[in-house]
Image (cartoon, rainbow, N blue to C red):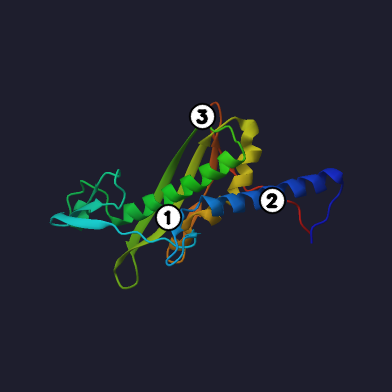
Amino acid sequence: MVQFDGRMSLLRFLQDLEFRTFFVAKCYLFLPRFPGRGSDMPSPDKSDFTIELKWHDHLSFDVKWDLPDAPEVFVDEPPALGGSGKGPNASRMVVAGVATCLAASLMFCLGKVRADVKDMRLRAHGTVERNAQGRLRLTRIRVEPLVTMPSEEQVRLARCVGMFEDFCIVTEAVRKGVPVDVQVFLVDEKGEEHPVEARVRQEQ
């Protein structure tokens, strides 16, 4: 149950509730829209896509996307697994997919709260190890967004930290099989990194 200790606490709660409602609505509208089958009405609830892989040689492939302006990507396995190591392998592609999805979701939220973002980069870590049957598996992913902004903007960043992961399509799907840890850092004017926790209202 939420209790309020004064007029300002109630105001902050209402502002936070208004922002969450606005953000959810905007994220829904932000989804791509496709014509519904047998109807002229657009449908944002489902989309399908197809990519193609063309064998290059040995364990390497060229990935061709279904986007006309997207360049092909050369993928390969590392030498330890029999490849040349000249391109990312499947594990790295999965980690990159999770990281880019989180980055887009976080930047979308920061834009909505009008945060003064100067720059953003991400560190993404993946762990591959053998399971009980001796098979190599991707067992953990950790993503660290590093957002450069003035220190006084941390409140806006904290508002997004509390919700942006839920709107990342890839991360929430991958989490059903692989643990994904996320820690957002604010990078201040001196280049120092400060971990940011989600802003939550007091509850009892």
Q: Earlier in the sequence, mark 3 or mark 2?
A: 3
Mark in the foreground, 3 or 2: 2
Circle 1 crowding by C-alpha within 10 Å: few under 14, some 14–19, many from 20:
many
Residue position marked by numbered label 3 in the rendering: 191
Q: Nearer the viewer, mark 2 or mark 1?
A: 2
Q: In percent of the image, x 80 and y 45: which residue is there? A: 11
Residue situated in front as seen by the camera: 168 or 78: 168
Residue sitting farthest toward the right? 6
Residue 197 percent location from the top left of the image: 61, 47
Residue 32 in sight: yes
Q: Which residue is mark 2?
A: 200
Sequence-first tag of 3 and 1: 1
Q: Is residue 32 left or right of residue 89?
A: right
Query: Residue 91 in the image: x percent, y percent?
Result: 32, 56
The secondary element bearing badge 1 is classed as: strand
The residue carrying mark 1 is 141
Amino acid at dot 2: Val
Label 3–label 2 contact, CB within 8 A: no
C-alpha separation, residue under disc 2 versus residue under disc 1 = 25 Å
* Contact (Cβ within 8 Å) of mark 3 with mark 1: no
Q: CA distance from mark 3 to mark 1?
A: 25 Å
In what quadrant of the picture does the C terminus appear?
bottom right
N-term mark: 2 or 1: 1
